[in-house]
Image: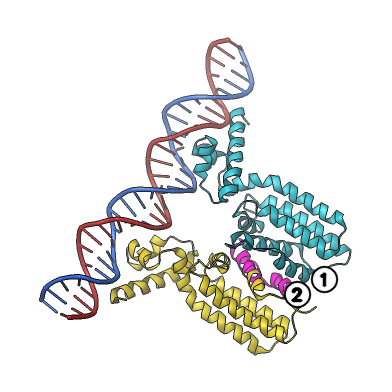
Chain colours: A yellow, B cyan, C red, D blue
Amino acid sequence: MRADARRNYDKILANARIVFTERGTDSSLDEIAKRAGVGAGTLYRHFPTREALVDALMQDWTDRVSADADAAIGTGLPAREMLLGWFEHFIDHITLHRGAASKICAAMDDPASPMYRKCRVMGDANRRVIDHLDAEGELRPGVDAANVMRLVSGVASVADTSHADLDVRPMLEVVVDGIVRA
Amino acid sequence: MRADARRNYDKILANARIVFTERGTDSSLDEIAKRAGVGAGTLYRHFPTREALVDALMQDWTDRVSADADAAIGTGLPAREMLLGWFEHFIDHITLHRGAASKICAAMDDPASPMYRKCRVMGDANRRVIDHLDAEGELRPGVDAANVMRLVSGVASVADTSHADLDVRPMLEVVVDGIVRA
DNA sequence: TGCTAAAACGGAGACAGTCTCCGTATTGTG
DNA sequence: CACAATACGGAGACTGTCTCCGTTTTAGCA
């Protein structure tokens, strides 16, 4: 990658992060280009779609999400608490930019999406937590990690969409009660 | 309401139903106007926002949703089956037009939304089912109907958003297990 | 029936966002 | 330092939203 290209790539990403944080992932891409001091063409050359741009920003938090999963396992807390903590952290991360959660819901089961691979990384993180608890015999038989992932992402997306700023805990408690051994 | 106004109102609604079914609730409103054979101004006078238009279409199914809730209670099935059936019917209805589910999630806790009232009607239907089972002692203590509603709408929205056409049943089973008495 | 005020119509056009195209500028390699 | 190769930028085509206002339709009344 040429030096000027790299420079612009970074500028776009930095400004996208700011704008997406301020106004969500549906903000105008032209404005991001303007703020970054580049032409629209440059933005679209580097990131052909909005999803590609969101995807590039996701890198930061897929790492954190992954680390959080392992940290959760490390706490050795009882199943309920471990899951609640992990789910809350996960949701905190994916709702960082308004609108991101529902994009993740959409990408999760769509291999054609640019975001698919990162969704898999997060899915794997979740699977580690679920598998760990399952191995300990803490879960109901037949709990499917992918399914849990969808459900929790759904909660994130509801919270993100909601006009009121909703406490996700009560919803997560239902989910947790639905998967831990009765 | 003047006769011509009524005529146009109905034409717009009929065509919106078609277009929303074919291409989801984010289709072009101008196209709906065109198909209905009216000017854009006429459409916007009758339905100042997209939500107002969706809301008008919702009337059909809030009725059906309400009836479904009472039918579910009437079956006298065991709690798990009653809830699964009710939730599935509910989701079938609100995912009739692609994109509607997430709009409902957003409107549910936003009294300013034109769709708020109809969300309440559906919320009340859900409450009847939950209250009924609660009175029978079938549910865990402290189950909150509004919270269940959010969760199930979230499942609907995930299913609606998902590229793959997802089976909602496994997700609903987790939710149901999370609310019925252990 | 014919007249008129009130109500409703419609579509041109202002505006905002997406995305492309291509003449121009920048890079780095030989 | 020359010259491909690479990248830039922003004008402008396109699509969708939404408003404004001159024109048409309606309904009530004489």
- Disc 1 element: loop
User: Looking at the image, do the residues carrying marks 2 and 1 touch, with CB atoms under 8 Å apart?
Assistant: yes
Quarter occupied by residue A70: bottom right
Q: Is residue A16 left or right of residue D26?
A: left
- Mark 2 residue element: helix
Query: Which chain letter matches label 2?
Result: A
In the picture, residue A75 is in which quadrant?
bottom right
Query: Measured along the vertical axis of the image, is residue B122 above or below residue A36?
Result: above
**Residue A88 x/y as whole percent:** 63, 76
Residue tagged 2: A177
Q: Residues within 10 Å of mark 1 (few under 14, many from 20)?
A: some
Quarter of the image for the N terminus of chain B: give it. Answer: top right
Which amino acid type is shown beneath numbered disc 1? Arg
Residue occupying image coordinates x 33% and y 62%:
A41
The image shows residue A94, relative to residue B118, as above or below, that is below
Task: Please tell me which residue is depicted at 43% across the width and 69% down the height of the picture.
Answer: A16
Task: Give the spatial CA distance, label 2 vs label 1.
Answer: 10 Å
Q: Which residues are magenta?
A: A151-176
Please name the residue shown 48% across and 77% down the image.
A59
- The amino acid type found where label 2 is placed reads Asp
Of B133 and B144, which appears nearest the observer?
B133
Residue B173 drawn at (x, y percent): 75, 68
Q: Position of residue B90 (x, y in %)?
A: 72, 56
The quarter of the image holding the C terminus of chain B is bottom right
In the picture, measured across the screen, residue A78 lies left or right of residue B139, that is left
Closest to the observer, A161 or A55: A55
Q: Chain of mark 1?
A: B
**Secondary structure character of the magenta stretch overall:** helix
Give residue D13's position: percent from left, percent from top.
33, 48
Which residue in the structure is indicated by mark 1? B140
Query: Which-is-in-front pick, marks 2 and 1?
Result: 2
Q: Residue at x 52, y 45 (%)?
A: B29
